[in-house]
Image (cartoon, rainbow, N blue to C red):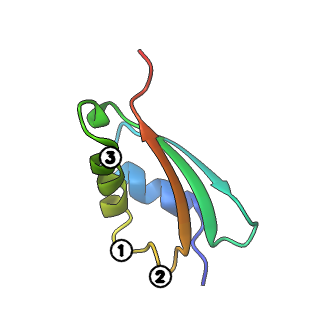
Amino acid sequence: MAMDASEIERLIKASIPDAQVTIRDLAGDGDHYAATVLSESFRGKSRVQQHQIVYAALRGQLGGILHALALQTGVPER
């Protein structure tokens, strides 16, 4: 069972309301995605901390329903 890109975005935005989220299906199979997540709440946090916040938002779906996620995070330009 695959996870829809809109569900990934919904989960991220539920935990990070100000997030700007872009999702791309890399293989067309609903299992391999690339996500870019920008949020002001990431300011001052390391890249590892930013990724941990996004992974927590996905509530353990990575490796299960969501097979692979190439993640880029950052803060929006002012």
C-alpha span from label 2 to label 1: 8 Å
Q: Position of residue 59 (x, y in %)?
A: 33, 69
Q: Mark 2 points at which residue?
A: 64
Q: How many marks on residues?
A: 3
Give me the C-alpha separation between circle 3 and circle 2: 21 Å
Q: Is the residue 30 above or below the residue 24 in the image?
A: below
Residue at horizontal 51 percent and vertical 79 percent from the top = 65
Query: Where does residue 25 sit, x and y in percent of width and height?
Result: 68, 59
Nearer to us of marks 3 and 2 is 3
Q: Is residue 33 above or below residue 64?
A: above
Location of mark 1 (residue): 60
User: CA separation, marks 3 and 1?
Assistant: 16 Å
Q: In this view, does 66 lie above or below 52?
A: below
Q: What element does badge 1 sit on?
A: loop
Amino acid type, label 2: Gly
10 Å neighbourhood of mark 3: few (<14), some, or many (≥20)? many
Task: Indicate left or right for 32 with 27 as reference.
Answer: left
Look at the numbered discs 2 and 1 and tell me whether their residues touch, using CB distance below 8 Å.
Answer: yes
What's the residue at 59%, 55% (across, down)? 34
Pointer 2: residues within 10 angstroms few (<14), some, or many (20+)? few
**In this figure, which residue is indicated by the disc labeled 3?**
50
Q: Is mark 2 on a helix, strand or loop?
A: loop
View extreme (left): residue = 44
- Give the mark nearest the N terminus, 3 or 2: 3
Point 36% across, 36% down: residue? 18
